[in-house]
Amino acid sequence: MAELNGEPVEPAQLQNLALTNYGHFTSMRVDDGRVRGLSLHMERLQRDCRTLFGTDIDPQRVRELARRAAPSTGSTTVRVTVFDPSLDLGHPDKADDPHILVTSRPAGALPLPPLKVQSTTYVRDVPSVKSVGLFATLHHRRQAQLNGFDDALFVDQEHVISEGGTWNIGFFDGSRVIWPSADCLVGVTMDLLKAAHDHETRSVRLDDLTNMRAAFATNAAIGVRAVSAIDGIELPESHAIIDTLRKEYMEIEGDLL
């Protein structure tokens, strides 16, 4: 399903999005008509819209359009993409008429199997914005997969860990949950888990991994997913803290879309 401003979308209407790749989005898992962290998703869309287009977006209108893509029962992933179809490549300063593209796909069953990831040096452009510009993310993911891993883990020049391509990462040092302190796209699922479970935020380097007892990835689509290897360092495929975080996340009541 794909609709632009509540109407069936024509291929020509997506040409500008495909060619300029300027816009932002959020992806929500809708379970039986409810979304965990719905207000955080709406805040993200409002914040990013002001950053990229200098204007506001109506969250109630977004919810109305998103409801059309989500059945009242079952699980669906709904993506809301905001872009200006009239954007001129030579004058992006004139882009101030954002449109709302809503797409949906079936949501996978949870939990997903553990991830094995390869570290790569990369810091995304404008990390605070959930941008549609996914070239670097997919390039690094492809390279990691060609090397036998499932995905890429981003680090800076000093080997400070920030995030995965489409997910946040957290660690357990044997006593508490650790979230990396670094420039990254702060995910809704990470924010919800921070509110649900005691934690510490601090810098984590690749050299620190030998002191970690477990690692996990989070986003709205995967919930909490174990990370079983980073480069050549193996971590447990299952751990009590991961089970606890999954339980706490699943116990968060979703809001009606």
Image (cartoon, rainbow, N blue to C red):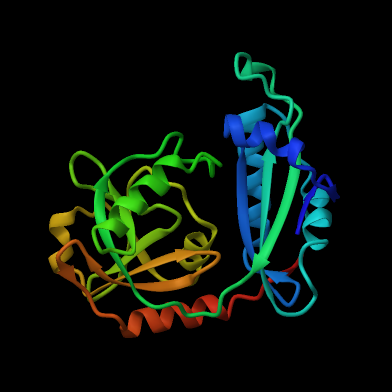
At 18% from the left and 41% from the top, the residue drawn is 158
* Residue 212 appears left or right of 5: left
Q: In this view, does 151 lie above or below 22?
A: below
Residue 54, how many percent across, how many down?
67, 26
Q: Specify the quadrant of the image occupied by residue 234.
A: bottom left
* Quadrant housing the N terminus: bottom right
**As displayed, is residue 63 above or below residue 51?**
below
Q: In this view, does 1 lie to the left or right of 141?
A: right
Residue 162 in sight from this viewpoint: no
Identity of the residue drawn at 60% across and 41% down:
24
- Foreground residue among 169 and 95: 95
Q: In which quadrant of the rendered image does the C terminus lie?
A: bottom right
Q: In which quarter of the image is residue 157?
A: top left
Q: In this view, does 210 lie to the left or right of 13?
A: left
> Residue 162's x, y, as percent?
32, 50
> At which x and y percent is residue 35?
67, 67
Q: Residue at x 81, y 54 (%)?
A: 65
Asked which quadrant contains residue 215, the reply is bottom left
Query: Could you say where residue 149 lies in the image, as x and y percent from the top left?
Result: 28, 63
Identify which residue, 248 or 200, lies in the foreground.
248
Is residue 52 placed above or below 134 in the rendered structure? Answer: above
Is residue 128 shown to the viewer in this render?
yes
Q: For the point 73% across and 31% down, which residue is it?
A: 85
Residue at the farthest top position:
90
Indicate whether 129 appears above or below 51.
Answer: below
